[in-house]
Amino acid sequence: MLDDQEGPDNRSVIETLNRLCSIVEEEPDLHAICNTFRSELSKYCPSEAIELLSYSNDPKELLRIASSTDEPGGSRIRFDDDSSSWIELGKPDALYIFTDVKEAPFFVRDMAEKAGSSSAAIFARRERAGKRTILAVLAKEGYDISSWEKSESLVELLRGSAILLEYCKLISDMNNYRMDFLSLFDLIPIAIIQLDEKGTVKSANNEAELILGSGDPDRGIEEENVFKEESFKKSGIAALVRRALRGEDAEAENIRFRGADGRNRYLFVKLRSIIGSDGKRQIIGILTDVSARIQLQQQLERSYQTLTEAFHELQRADKMKSQFIDVVSHELRTPLTVIRGYLDMISHTRGDSLDPKLAQKLDSISLNTDRLYEIVESMLDSARIEKGAVEVVKQETSLKAMLEEIVASLRGLANEKHQELLLVDVGETGLVQIDTKKMRDALKHIINNAIKYTQDGGKIQVTLTDEGNMIHIMVRDNGIGIPLSEISKIFERFYIVAADELSHQVDRMGLGLPIAKGIIESHGGKIWVESEIGKGTVFHINMPKG
Ligand code: ADP
Protein backbone atom coordinates (compact mmCIF):
# COMPACT_ATOMS: atom_id res chain seq x y z
CA MET A 1 0.00 0.00 0.00
CA LEU A 2 2.85 2.36 0.87
CA ASP A 3 3.85 2.31 -2.67
CA ASP A 4 0.41 3.30 -3.84
CA GLN A 5 1.11 6.99 -4.30
CA GLU A 6 -2.45 7.51 -5.62
CA GLY A 7 -3.76 6.98 -2.08
CA PRO A 8 -6.33 4.55 -0.69
CA ASP A 9 -9.24 3.13 -2.58
CA ASN A 10 -12.81 3.95 -1.48
CA ARG A 11 -13.21 0.68 0.34
CA SER A 12 -10.11 1.33 2.48
CA VAL A 13 -11.33 4.86 3.24
CA ILE A 14 -14.66 3.49 4.50
CA GLU A 15 -12.93 0.81 6.55
CA THR A 16 -10.51 3.32 8.11
CA LEU A 17 -13.31 5.72 8.94
CA ASN A 18 -15.34 2.87 10.44
CA ARG A 19 -12.47 1.94 12.72
CA LEU A 20 -12.08 5.54 13.81
CA CYS A 21 -15.85 5.73 14.42
CA SER A 22 -15.84 2.74 16.72
CA ILE A 23 -12.99 4.28 18.75
CA VAL A 24 -14.95 7.51 19.04
CA GLU A 25 -17.97 5.52 20.17
CA GLU A 26 -16.01 3.55 22.73
CA GLU A 27 -14.08 6.37 24.25
CA PRO A 28 -13.88 9.78 22.66
CA ASP A 29 -10.29 10.50 23.65
CA LEU A 30 -8.78 13.01 21.22
CA HIS A 31 -5.15 12.07 21.77
CA ALA A 32 -5.90 8.36 21.21
CA ILE A 33 -7.88 9.08 18.03
CA CYS A 34 -5.07 11.27 16.65
CA ASN A 35 -2.67 8.40 17.19
CA THR A 36 -4.94 5.80 15.64
CA PHE A 37 -5.54 8.09 12.71
CA ARG A 38 -1.80 8.56 12.34
CA SER A 39 -1.20 4.82 12.24
CA GLU A 40 -4.13 4.26 9.84
CA LEU A 41 -2.81 7.00 7.58
CA SER A 42 0.73 5.69 7.69
CA LYS A 43 -0.48 2.93 5.35
CA TYR A 44 -0.64 5.62 2.67
CA CYS A 45 1.56 8.31 4.14
CA PRO A 46 3.89 7.85 7.08
CA SER A 47 3.75 11.02 9.20
CA GLU A 48 5.75 12.60 12.00
CA ALA A 49 2.69 14.05 13.62
CA ILE A 50 -1.01 14.69 13.25
CA GLU A 51 -2.22 18.00 14.65
CA LEU A 52 -5.82 19.10 15.10
CA LEU A 53 -6.10 22.88 15.39
CA SER A 54 -8.89 25.36 15.93
CA TYR A 55 -8.70 28.85 14.47
CA SER A 56 -10.89 31.64 15.76
CA ASN A 57 -11.10 35.01 14.01
CA ASP A 58 -12.39 37.10 16.91
CA PRO A 59 -10.13 37.32 18.81
CA LYS A 60 -7.59 35.89 16.39
CA GLU A 61 -6.34 32.72 17.99
CA LEU A 62 -4.91 29.39 16.86
CA LEU A 63 -5.14 26.62 19.43
CA ARG A 64 -4.06 23.01 19.38
CA ILE A 65 -7.12 20.86 20.11
CA ALA A 66 -5.25 17.58 20.06
CA SER A 67 -2.08 16.02 18.76
CA SER A 68 -0.57 12.61 18.14
CA THR A 69 2.51 13.97 19.93
CA ASP A 70 2.72 14.69 23.65
CA GLU A 71 1.89 18.37 23.16
CA PRO A 72 -1.10 19.17 25.37
CA GLY A 73 -4.47 20.14 23.94
CA GLY A 74 -5.29 23.81 24.47
CA SER A 75 -1.72 25.04 23.82
CA ARG A 76 -1.18 27.99 21.49
CA ILE A 77 0.21 27.64 17.98
CA ARG A 78 2.38 30.47 16.70
CA PHE A 79 0.98 32.23 13.64
CA ASP A 80 1.40 35.53 11.80
CA ASP A 81 -0.97 37.87 9.91
CA ASP A 82 -0.37 36.04 6.64
CA SER A 83 -1.29 32.75 8.33
CA SER A 84 -4.58 34.13 9.61
CA SER A 85 -5.52 35.65 6.20
CA TRP A 86 -4.57 32.34 4.56
CA ILE A 87 -6.87 30.45 6.95
CA GLU A 88 -9.71 32.97 6.73
CA LEU A 89 -9.65 33.17 2.93
CA GLY A 90 -9.12 29.45 2.34
CA LYS A 91 -11.79 27.38 0.56
CA PRO A 92 -14.19 25.39 2.77
CA ASP A 93 -13.32 21.73 3.26
CA ALA A 94 -10.24 21.98 1.12
CA LEU A 95 -7.00 20.06 1.08
CA TYR A 96 -3.71 21.95 0.66
CA ILE A 97 -0.53 20.06 -0.11
CA PHE A 98 2.85 21.60 0.64
CA THR A 99 5.58 19.36 -0.81
CA ASP A 100 8.00 21.93 0.52
CA VAL A 101 6.89 23.52 3.75
CA LYS A 102 9.08 26.54 3.04
CA GLU A 103 6.24 27.64 0.76
CA ALA A 104 3.58 27.05 3.39
CA PRO A 105 2.15 29.73 5.70
CA PHE A 106 4.21 30.48 8.79
CA PHE A 107 2.17 28.35 11.23
CA VAL A 108 2.58 25.21 9.02
CA ARG A 109 6.27 25.90 8.55
CA ASP A 110 6.79 26.35 12.27
CA MET A 111 4.92 23.14 13.19
CA ALA A 112 6.72 21.12 10.49
CA GLU A 113 10.13 22.34 11.63
CA LYS A 114 9.36 21.36 15.20
CA ALA A 115 8.18 17.92 14.08
CA GLY A 116 11.21 17.47 11.74
CA SER A 117 9.05 17.31 8.65
CA SER A 118 9.51 19.08 5.31
CA SER A 119 6.14 18.42 3.68
CA ALA A 120 2.62 18.75 4.97
CA ALA A 121 -1.01 18.18 4.04
CA ILE A 122 -3.50 20.66 5.55
CA PHE A 123 -7.22 20.01 5.52
CA ALA A 124 -9.24 23.10 6.52
CA ARG A 125 -12.86 22.53 7.53
CA ARG A 126 -15.50 25.03 6.59
CA GLU A 127 -15.97 27.98 8.94
CA ARG A 128 -18.60 27.60 11.68
CA ALA A 129 -19.46 30.39 14.13
CA GLY A 130 -16.21 32.23 13.36
CA LYS A 131 -14.10 29.10 13.82
CA ARG A 132 -12.28 26.73 11.46
CA THR A 133 -10.92 23.31 12.35
CA ILE A 134 -7.61 22.46 10.71
CA LEU A 135 -6.21 18.96 10.40
CA ALA A 136 -2.46 18.96 9.71
CA VAL A 137 -0.54 15.87 8.57
CA LEU A 138 3.17 16.50 8.92
CA ALA A 139 4.67 13.90 6.58
CA LYS A 140 7.80 11.89 7.25
CA GLU A 141 11.00 13.35 5.93
CA GLY A 142 11.68 12.20 2.37
CA TYR A 143 8.13 11.05 1.69
CA ASP A 144 6.59 12.54 -1.43
CA ILE A 145 3.01 13.66 -0.93
CA SER A 146 2.61 15.50 -4.24
CA SER A 147 0.28 12.82 -5.60
CA TRP A 148 -2.22 13.36 -2.76
CA GLU A 149 -3.78 16.29 -4.52
CA LYS A 150 -5.03 13.97 -7.20
CA SER A 151 -6.45 11.37 -4.81
CA GLU A 152 -10.11 12.09 -4.16
CA SER A 153 -10.39 9.18 -1.77
CA LEU A 154 -7.59 10.62 0.34
CA VAL A 155 -9.33 13.99 0.48
CA GLU A 156 -12.46 12.12 1.63
CA LEU A 157 -10.47 10.27 4.25
CA LEU A 158 -9.05 13.51 5.58
CA ARG A 159 -12.45 15.23 5.50
CA GLY A 160 -14.08 12.29 7.33
CA SER A 161 -11.32 12.20 9.89
CA ALA A 162 -11.50 15.96 10.46
CA ILE A 163 -15.28 15.73 10.95
CA LEU A 164 -14.85 12.82 13.33
CA LEU A 165 -12.22 14.66 15.33
CA GLU A 166 -14.40 17.78 15.43
CA TYR A 167 -17.30 15.67 16.66
CA CYS A 168 -15.06 14.06 19.22
CA LYS A 169 -14.02 17.50 20.46
CA LEU A 170 -17.69 18.46 20.75
CA ILE A 171 -18.40 15.40 22.87
CA SER A 172 -15.43 16.11 25.08
CA ASP A 173 -16.56 19.77 25.47
CA MET A 174 -20.04 18.59 26.33
CA ASN A 175 -18.64 16.20 28.88
CA ASN A 176 -16.67 19.03 30.41
CA TYR A 177 -19.74 21.26 30.52
CA ARG A 178 -21.66 18.40 32.06
CA MET A 179 -19.01 17.98 34.73
CA ASP A 180 -19.09 21.74 35.41
CA PHE A 181 -22.85 21.62 35.59
CA LEU A 182 -22.83 18.63 37.92
CA SER A 183 -20.34 20.34 40.25
CA LEU A 184 -22.56 23.39 40.28
CA PHE A 185 -25.58 21.20 40.80
CA ASP A 186 -23.93 19.78 43.91
CA LEU A 187 -23.17 23.21 45.28
CA ILE A 188 -26.78 24.36 45.18
CA PRO A 189 -28.26 24.37 48.69
CA ILE A 190 -31.57 23.08 47.35
CA ALA A 191 -32.25 19.39 46.90
CA ILE A 192 -32.82 18.45 43.26
CA ILE A 193 -33.99 15.02 42.20
CA GLN A 194 -34.91 13.29 39.00
CA LEU A 195 -37.20 10.25 38.98
CA ASP A 196 -38.31 7.94 36.23
CA GLU A 197 -41.94 7.11 35.52
CA LYS A 198 -41.82 4.25 38.02
CA GLY A 199 -40.77 6.57 40.84
CA THR A 200 -37.15 5.43 40.92
CA VAL A 201 -34.56 8.09 41.73
CA LYS A 202 -32.32 8.55 38.70
CA SER A 203 -30.19 11.40 39.93
CA ALA A 204 -29.86 13.55 43.02
CA ASN A 205 -27.53 16.34 44.02
CA ASN A 206 -25.58 16.52 47.30
CA GLU A 207 -28.31 18.39 49.14
CA ALA A 208 -30.86 15.77 48.10
CA GLU A 209 -28.55 13.03 49.38
CA LEU A 210 -28.18 14.92 52.65
CA ILE A 211 -31.89 15.41 53.22
CA LEU A 212 -33.34 12.25 51.69
CA GLY A 213 -30.35 9.92 51.77
CA SER A 214 -30.02 6.63 53.57
CA GLY A 215 -27.23 7.98 55.77
CA ASP A 216 -24.89 5.40 54.25
CA PRO A 217 -22.17 7.33 52.35
CA ASP A 218 -21.51 4.33 50.07
CA ARG A 219 -25.14 3.98 49.10
CA GLY A 220 -26.74 7.06 47.57
CA ILE A 221 -30.44 7.46 46.98
CA GLU A 222 -30.09 6.70 43.30
CA GLU A 223 -32.19 3.66 42.35
CA GLU A 224 -34.33 4.02 45.49
CA ASN A 225 -38.02 3.89 44.70
CA VAL A 226 -40.26 6.49 46.33
CA PHE A 227 -43.27 4.15 46.18
CA LYS A 228 -41.43 1.49 48.16
CA GLU A 229 -39.45 3.46 50.74
CA GLU A 230 -41.37 4.08 54.00
CA SER A 231 -39.99 7.57 54.56
CA PHE A 232 -41.25 8.76 51.17
CA LYS A 233 -44.62 7.10 51.66
CA LYS A 234 -45.18 8.40 55.20
CA SER A 235 -44.12 11.96 54.43
CA GLY A 236 -46.52 12.22 51.49
CA ILE A 237 -43.76 12.68 48.90
CA ALA A 238 -44.82 9.45 47.17
CA ALA A 239 -48.38 10.77 46.85
CA LEU A 240 -47.03 13.99 45.39
CA VAL A 241 -44.99 12.03 42.82
CA ARG A 242 -48.16 10.15 41.85
CA ARG A 243 -49.94 13.45 41.31
CA ALA A 244 -47.08 14.82 39.23
CA LEU A 245 -47.12 11.65 37.11
CA ARG A 246 -50.81 12.26 36.45
CA GLY A 247 -49.80 15.72 35.22
CA GLU A 248 -51.43 17.42 38.23
CA ASP A 249 -50.06 20.28 40.26
CA ALA A 250 -47.62 18.75 42.75
CA GLU A 251 -46.42 21.27 45.28
CA ALA A 252 -46.59 21.13 49.06
CA GLU A 253 -45.29 23.16 51.94
CA ASN A 254 -44.32 21.82 55.34
CA ILE A 255 -43.90 18.17 54.36
CA ARG A 256 -42.56 16.41 57.44
CA PHE A 257 -39.80 14.02 56.41
CA ARG A 258 -38.00 11.73 58.81
CA GLY A 259 -34.48 11.23 57.47
CA ALA A 260 -32.19 8.26 57.96
CA ASP A 261 -30.39 10.29 60.66
CA GLY A 262 -33.66 10.22 62.65
CA ARG A 263 -34.12 13.94 62.21
CA ASN A 264 -37.49 15.36 61.30
CA ARG A 265 -37.25 17.99 58.66
CA TYR A 266 -39.92 20.23 57.19
CA LEU A 267 -39.66 20.43 53.44
CA PHE A 268 -41.10 22.52 50.70
CA VAL A 269 -41.53 20.19 47.72
CA LYS A 270 -42.29 21.07 44.13
CA LEU A 271 -42.42 18.42 41.41
CA ARG A 272 -42.98 18.61 37.71
CA SER A 273 -43.45 15.96 35.09
CA ILE A 274 -41.49 16.31 31.85
CA ILE A 275 -40.78 14.17 28.81
CA GLY A 276 -37.11 13.17 28.84
CA SER A 277 -34.74 12.92 25.87
CA ASP A 278 -35.62 9.21 25.65
CA GLY A 279 -39.27 10.15 25.08
CA LYS A 280 -40.30 8.78 28.46
CA ARG A 281 -42.11 10.64 31.21
CA GLN A 282 -39.95 11.63 34.16
CA ILE A 283 -40.24 13.76 37.27
CA ILE A 284 -37.92 16.53 38.27
CA GLY A 285 -38.28 18.14 41.63
CA ILE A 286 -36.83 20.57 44.10
CA LEU A 287 -36.99 20.22 47.86
CA THR A 288 -36.04 22.94 50.30
CA ASP A 289 -35.42 22.43 53.98
CA VAL A 290 -37.70 24.97 55.69
CA SER A 291 -37.31 23.52 59.20
CA ALA A 292 -35.66 26.65 60.61
CA ARG A 293 -38.54 28.80 59.42
CA ILE A 294 -41.18 26.39 60.71
CA GLN A 295 -39.44 26.14 64.09
CA LEU A 296 -39.34 29.90 64.31
CA GLN A 297 -42.99 30.07 63.37
CA GLN A 298 -43.87 27.49 66.05
CA GLN A 299 -41.80 29.37 68.61
CA LEU A 300 -43.55 32.59 67.67
CA GLU A 301 -46.93 30.92 67.99
CA ARG A 302 -45.98 29.61 71.44
CA SER A 303 -44.66 33.03 72.51
CA TYR A 304 -47.81 34.64 71.19
CA GLN A 305 -49.91 32.22 73.22
CA THR A 306 -47.87 32.85 76.38
CA LEU A 307 -48.11 36.59 75.81
CA THR A 308 -51.85 36.41 75.25
CA GLU A 309 -52.26 34.44 78.47
CA ALA A 310 -50.08 36.94 80.34
CA PHE A 311 -52.07 39.78 78.83
CA HIS A 312 -55.38 38.25 79.95
CA GLU A 313 -53.91 37.71 83.40
CA LEU A 314 -52.83 41.35 83.48
CA GLN A 315 -56.25 42.47 82.32
CA ARG A 316 -57.82 40.41 85.10
CA ALA A 317 -55.40 41.86 87.69
CA ASP A 318 -56.05 45.37 86.38
CA LYS A 319 -59.78 44.85 86.61
CA MET A 320 -59.43 43.56 90.16
CA LYS A 321 -57.26 46.55 91.04
CA SER A 322 -59.86 48.94 89.60
CA GLN A 323 -62.65 47.19 91.50
CA PHE A 324 -60.61 47.35 94.68
CA ILE A 325 -59.89 51.06 94.22
CA ASP A 326 -63.56 51.72 93.46
CA VAL A 327 -64.73 49.93 96.56
CA VAL A 328 -62.10 51.52 98.81
CA SER A 329 -62.79 55.00 97.43
CA HIS A 330 -66.53 54.65 97.93
CA GLU A 331 -66.07 53.27 101.41
CA LEU A 332 -63.65 56.09 102.34
CA ARG A 333 -65.70 58.85 100.89
CA THR A 334 -68.61 58.59 103.36
CA PRO A 335 -66.58 58.64 106.63
CA LEU A 336 -64.36 61.36 105.16
CA THR A 337 -67.39 63.50 104.38
CA VAL A 338 -68.58 63.02 107.94
CA ILE A 339 -65.14 63.94 109.39
CA ARG A 340 -64.91 67.00 107.14
CA GLY A 341 -68.40 68.04 108.31
CA TYR A 342 -67.39 67.77 111.97
CA LEU A 343 -64.10 69.58 111.34
CA ASP A 344 -65.99 72.35 109.60
CA MET A 345 -68.37 72.58 112.52
CA ILE A 346 -65.51 72.69 115.06
CA SER A 347 -63.62 75.35 113.13
CA HIS A 348 -66.73 77.51 113.10
CA THR A 349 -67.43 77.12 116.80
CA ARG A 350 -64.00 76.82 118.37
CA GLY A 351 -63.59 80.53 119.25
CA ASP A 352 -60.36 82.29 120.18
CA SER A 353 -60.02 80.64 123.61
CA LEU A 354 -58.85 77.30 122.12
CA ASP A 355 -55.42 76.15 123.18
CA PRO A 356 -53.09 77.30 120.31
CA LYS A 357 -51.39 73.90 120.22
CA LEU A 358 -54.76 72.16 119.90
CA ALA A 359 -55.85 74.71 117.27
CA GLN A 360 -52.69 73.99 115.24
CA LYS A 361 -53.36 70.25 115.42
CA LEU A 362 -56.95 70.78 114.39
CA ASP A 363 -55.79 72.81 111.35
CA SER A 364 -53.38 70.05 110.42
CA ILE A 365 -56.12 67.42 110.71
CA SER A 366 -58.35 69.58 108.53
CA LEU A 367 -55.65 70.06 105.88
CA ASN A 368 -54.81 66.38 105.67
CA THR A 369 -58.45 65.37 105.61
CA ASP A 370 -59.00 67.71 102.66
CA ARG A 371 -55.97 66.22 100.92
CA LEU A 372 -57.28 62.71 101.54
CA TYR A 373 -60.70 63.72 100.30
CA GLU A 374 -59.12 65.11 97.10
CA ILE A 375 -57.28 61.84 96.53
CA VAL A 376 -60.47 59.84 97.01
CA GLU A 377 -62.27 62.20 94.61
CA SER A 378 -59.48 61.76 92.05
CA MET A 379 -59.76 58.01 92.34
CA LEU A 380 -63.52 58.15 91.83
CA ASP A 381 -63.07 60.55 88.89
CA SER A 382 -60.55 58.29 87.23
CA ALA A 383 -62.84 55.29 87.77
CA ARG A 384 -65.69 57.17 86.14
CA ILE A 385 -63.46 58.18 83.23
CA GLU A 386 -62.38 54.61 82.74
CA LYS A 387 -65.97 53.47 82.62
CA GLY A 388 -66.76 56.32 80.20
CA ALA A 389 -69.22 57.71 82.72
CA VAL A 390 -68.00 61.33 82.87
CA GLU A 391 -70.88 63.69 83.01
CA VAL A 392 -70.12 66.93 81.17
CA VAL A 393 -72.31 69.90 82.00
CA LYS A 394 -71.40 72.64 79.53
CA GLN A 395 -71.74 76.34 80.01
CA GLU A 396 -70.35 79.37 78.23
CA THR A 397 -66.90 80.08 79.56
CA SER A 398 -63.97 82.32 78.66
CA LEU A 399 -60.86 80.16 78.52
CA LYS A 400 -58.71 83.26 78.71
CA ALA A 401 -60.35 84.30 81.99
CA MET A 402 -60.07 80.74 83.25
CA LEU A 403 -56.34 80.54 82.53
CA GLU A 404 -55.75 83.93 84.15
CA GLU A 405 -57.56 82.72 87.25
CA ILE A 406 -55.61 79.43 87.39
CA VAL A 407 -52.27 81.17 86.92
CA ALA A 408 -53.15 83.65 89.64
CA SER A 409 -54.10 80.83 92.00
CA LEU A 410 -50.81 78.98 91.36
CA ARG A 411 -48.53 81.99 91.42
CA GLY A 412 -47.86 81.57 95.12
CA LEU A 413 -46.66 78.00 94.50
CA ALA A 414 -44.39 79.12 91.66
CA ASN A 415 -43.03 81.98 93.76
CA GLU A 416 -42.07 79.53 96.48
CA LYS A 417 -39.79 77.87 93.91
CA HIS A 418 -38.66 81.23 92.50
CA GLN A 419 -40.14 80.24 89.17
CA GLU A 420 -41.41 82.53 86.50
CA LEU A 421 -45.01 81.62 85.67
CA LEU A 422 -46.27 83.61 82.70
CA LEU A 423 -49.28 83.84 80.48
CA VAL A 424 -47.89 84.80 77.08
CA ASP A 425 -49.51 85.33 73.70
CA VAL A 426 -52.91 84.83 75.16
CA GLY A 427 -55.31 85.73 72.39
CA GLU A 428 -58.98 86.47 72.67
CA THR A 429 -60.92 83.31 71.90
CA GLY A 430 -64.38 84.40 72.96
CA LEU A 431 -66.71 82.19 74.92
CA VAL A 432 -66.65 78.42 74.56
CA GLN A 433 -69.06 75.70 75.66
CA ILE A 434 -67.28 73.64 78.33
CA ASP A 435 -67.77 72.05 81.72
CA THR A 436 -66.12 74.89 83.63
CA LYS A 437 -65.28 73.02 86.81
CA LYS A 438 -63.86 69.97 85.11
CA MET A 439 -61.81 71.92 82.55
CA ARG A 440 -60.48 74.17 85.29
CA ASP A 441 -59.37 71.08 87.26
CA ALA A 442 -57.70 69.58 84.17
CA LEU A 443 -55.79 72.75 83.18
CA LYS A 444 -54.85 73.51 86.76
CA HIS A 445 -53.40 70.06 87.13
CA ILE A 446 -51.24 70.40 84.01
CA ILE A 447 -49.90 73.82 85.04
CA ASN A 448 -49.41 72.53 88.58
CA ASN A 449 -47.38 69.62 87.14
CA ALA A 450 -45.21 72.08 85.20
CA ILE A 451 -44.39 73.82 88.48
CA LYS A 452 -43.92 70.49 90.28
CA TYR A 453 -41.56 68.98 87.71
CA THR A 454 -39.49 72.11 87.10
CA GLN A 455 -36.56 72.96 89.30
CA ASP A 456 -36.28 76.14 91.37
CA GLY A 457 -35.77 79.23 89.27
CA GLY A 458 -37.36 77.60 86.20
CA LYS A 459 -39.77 79.09 83.74
CA ILE A 460 -43.35 78.12 82.86
CA GLN A 461 -45.26 79.68 80.01
CA VAL A 462 -48.91 79.26 79.15
CA THR A 463 -50.29 80.31 75.75
CA LEU A 464 -53.77 80.37 74.25
CA THR A 465 -54.27 80.62 70.49
CA ASP A 466 -57.34 80.70 68.30
CA GLU A 467 -56.81 78.27 65.42
CA GLY A 468 -60.14 78.57 63.64
CA ASN A 469 -62.24 75.58 64.68
CA MET A 470 -59.91 74.79 67.52
CA ILE A 471 -58.38 76.54 70.48
CA HIS A 472 -54.82 75.56 71.19
CA ILE A 473 -53.47 75.76 74.74
CA MET A 474 -49.79 75.18 75.38
CA VAL A 475 -48.10 74.72 78.77
CA ARG A 476 -44.34 74.89 78.34
CA ASP A 477 -41.76 74.38 81.08
CA ASN A 478 -37.99 74.10 81.13
CA GLY A 479 -38.05 71.39 83.78
CA ILE A 480 -36.71 67.86 84.08
CA GLY A 481 -38.44 66.50 80.98
CA ILE A 482 -39.87 63.02 80.35
CA PRO A 483 -37.88 60.16 78.81
CA LEU A 484 -39.08 59.27 75.31
CA SER A 485 -39.88 55.71 76.38
CA GLU A 486 -42.28 56.98 79.07
CA ILE A 487 -44.17 59.56 77.06
CA SER A 488 -46.83 57.14 75.85
CA LYS A 489 -47.39 55.83 79.38
CA ILE A 490 -47.88 58.98 81.47
CA PHE A 491 -51.57 59.16 80.57
CA GLU A 492 -52.16 55.70 82.07
CA ARG A 493 -53.78 55.42 85.49
CA PHE A 494 -51.29 55.37 88.39
CA TYR A 495 -48.30 55.65 86.09
CA ILE A 496 -45.46 57.77 87.39
CA VAL A 497 -42.04 58.17 85.86
CA ALA A 498 -39.35 56.58 87.96
CA ALA A 499 -36.41 58.98 88.19
CA ASP A 500 -33.82 59.65 90.89
CA GLU A 501 -34.49 63.36 91.03
CA LEU A 502 -38.17 62.59 91.69
CA SER A 503 -37.59 60.27 94.62
CA HIS A 504 -38.15 63.10 97.14
CA GLN A 505 -41.41 64.20 95.44
CA VAL A 506 -44.19 63.00 97.70
CA ASP A 507 -47.53 63.96 96.19
CA ARG A 508 -47.37 61.73 93.16
CA MET A 509 -50.35 59.54 92.39
CA GLY A 510 -50.27 59.18 88.63
CA LEU A 511 -53.93 60.15 88.39
CA GLY A 512 -53.84 63.81 87.31
CA LEU A 513 -52.96 63.29 83.66
CA PRO A 514 -55.39 60.41 82.99
CA ILE A 515 -58.16 62.49 84.54
CA ALA A 516 -57.15 65.60 82.55
CA LYS A 517 -57.04 63.53 79.37
CA GLY A 518 -60.46 62.00 80.12
CA ILE A 519 -61.98 65.44 80.68
CA ILE A 520 -60.42 66.95 77.53
CA GLU A 521 -61.47 64.00 75.39
CA SER A 522 -65.00 64.02 76.77
CA HIS A 523 -65.15 67.56 75.30
CA GLY A 524 -64.01 66.24 71.93
CA GLY A 525 -60.54 67.68 72.54
CA LYS A 526 -57.06 66.23 72.36
CA ILE A 527 -53.99 66.32 74.58
CA TRP A 528 -50.43 65.37 73.67
CA VAL A 529 -46.96 66.02 74.90
CA GLU A 530 -43.49 66.82 73.58
CA SER A 531 -40.55 66.53 75.89
CA GLU A 532 -36.81 66.34 76.04
CA ILE A 533 -35.03 65.06 79.07
CA GLY A 534 -33.23 67.86 80.94
CA LYS A 535 -34.67 70.51 78.61
CA GLY A 536 -38.34 70.63 79.40
CA THR A 537 -41.84 69.61 78.45
CA VAL A 538 -44.68 71.06 76.41
CA PHE A 539 -48.26 69.89 76.91
CA HIS A 540 -50.54 70.72 73.97
CA ILE A 541 -54.29 70.81 74.26
CA ASN A 542 -56.65 71.26 71.34
CA MET A 543 -60.23 72.10 72.26
CA PRO A 544 -63.09 72.39 69.81
CA LYS A 545 -64.95 75.70 70.04
CA GLY A 546 -68.46 74.26 70.00
P1 ADP B 1 -48.58 62.80 89.38
O1 ADP B 1 -49.55 62.81 90.47
O2 ADP B 1 -47.50 61.81 89.58
O3 ADP B 1 -48.06 64.14 89.00
P2 ADP B 1 -49.69 62.76 86.73
O4 ADP B 1 -50.66 61.79 86.12
O5 ADP B 1 -50.07 64.15 86.71
O6 ADP B 1 -49.37 62.18 88.13
O7 ADP B 1 -48.34 62.62 85.92
C1 ADP B 1 -47.80 61.37 85.67
C2 ADP B 1 -46.28 61.46 85.59
O8 ADP B 1 -45.91 62.22 84.44
C3 ADP B 1 -45.67 62.22 86.73
O9 ADP B 1 -45.44 61.35 87.82
C4 ADP B 1 -44.37 62.74 86.14
O10 ADP B 1 -43.38 61.74 86.23
C5 ADP B 1 -44.71 62.95 84.69
N1 ADP B 1 -44.98 64.36 84.35
C6 ADP B 1 -46.18 64.99 84.28
N2 ADP B 1 -46.04 66.27 83.93
C7 ADP B 1 -44.71 66.50 83.80
C8 ADP B 1 -43.90 67.64 83.45
N3 ADP B 1 -44.44 68.84 83.17
N4 ADP B 1 -42.56 67.48 83.41
C9 ADP B 1 -42.00 66.27 83.68
N5 ADP B 1 -42.70 65.16 84.01
C10 ADP B 1 -44.04 65.27 84.07
Image (cartoon, rainbow, N blue to C red):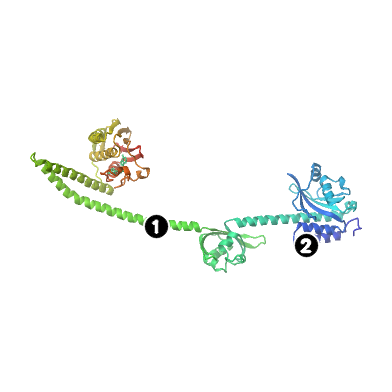
Say if residue 94 shows up in the picture.
no
Residue identifier under label 2 = 22
Q: Name the kind of residue labelled 2 in the image.
A: Ser
Q: Secondary structure at mark 2?
A: helix
Q: Nearer the viewer, residue 42 or 278?
A: 42
Q: Locate ligand 1 by image quadrant.
A: top left
Contact, mark 2 vs mark 1 (Cβ under 8 Å): no
Which of 55/18 is in front? Answer: 55
- In the picture, the disc for residue 305 is 1
Q: Residue at x 35, y 45 (%)?
A: 486
Location of residue 424 with respect to 529 vertically, above or below: above
Q: Amino acid at mark 1?
A: Gln
Q: Quadrant of the N terminus?
A: bottom right
Quadrant where the C terminus lies? Answer: top left
Which of 288 and 451 lies nearest the eye of the viewer? 451
* Cα separation between marks 2 and 1: 72 Å
Q: Is residue 400 visible from the viewing direction of this image?
A: yes
Mark 1 Cα shell of 10 Å, populated few (<14), some (14-19), many (≥20): few
Mark 1 lies on a secondary structure that is: helix
User: Which quadrant of the figure has residue 506?
Assistant: top left
Q: Residue at x 16, y 47 (%)?
A: 337
